[in-house]
């Protein structure tokens, strides 16, 4: 099983919690706050969205000039696995592998340099 992303789990749990509690929270707010306060809050929210959205659209270009979005490029150099026969940690250079054109295809077999047995490569994990 692949590792689950922490942010994905947190977003899911937050959505479940919000969905389950919203009717109760809405009922309590409407029972304890006057209509004038609710209406004023909605007007302030709408105006804030328009004002902050406009400011963001005008000024965000300056922000990204100082803090650009970037990607870290990496190139595979080797693979590492534990031999199922001798439990030896094996590292093989990328150039010594028969890498499939599409990484989702079959990776084939390699020989363990420690026990000399043939190991069938299965799924991979990116580190």
Image (spheres, rainbow, N blue to C red):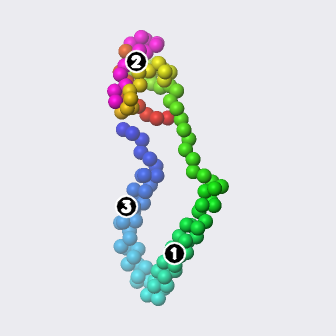
Q: Which mark is residue 16?
A: 3
Q: How many marks?
A: 3
Give the mark, 1 or 2, whose residue is nearer the N terminus.
Answer: 1
Q: Quadrant of residue 121?
A: top left
Q: How many angstroms separate mark 1 from mark 2 (CA)?
A: 60 Å
Q: Residue furthest left?
A: 106
Task: Please tell me which residue is depicted at 45% across the width and 24% down the height of the picture.
Answer: 81
Residue ID for mark 1: 50
Give the magenta range.
105-117
Please tell me whether mark 2 or mark 3 is closer to you in this view.
Answer: 2
For the residue pair 102 and 12, the one nearer the viewer reads as 102
Q: Secondary structure at mark 1?
A: helix
Disc 2: which residue: 110
Q: Position of residue 99 (x, y in %)?
A: 41, 25
Compare residues 66 and 15 and report the one nearer the observer. 66
Q: Residue furthest right?
A: 66
Q: Secondary structure at mark 2?
A: strand
Q: In percent of the image, x 63 and y 56: which residue is there?
A: 65
């Amino acid at each position: 099983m692949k590792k689950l992303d922490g942010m994905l789990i947190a977003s899911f749990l937050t959505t479940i919690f919000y969905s389950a509690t919203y009717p109760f929270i809405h009922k309590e707010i409407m029972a304890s706050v006057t209509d004038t306060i609710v209406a004023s809050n909605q007007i302030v929210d709408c105006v804030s969205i328009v004002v902050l959205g406009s400011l963001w659209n005008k000024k965000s270009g300056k922000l990204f000039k100082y803090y650009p979005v970037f990607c870290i490029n990496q190139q595979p150099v080797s693979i590492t696995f534990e031999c199922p026969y001798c439990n030896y940690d094996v590292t093989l250079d990328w150039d010594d592998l028969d890498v499939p054109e599409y990484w989702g295809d079959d990776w084939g077999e390699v020989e363990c340099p420690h026990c000399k047995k043939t190991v069938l490569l299965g799924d991979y994990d990116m580190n």
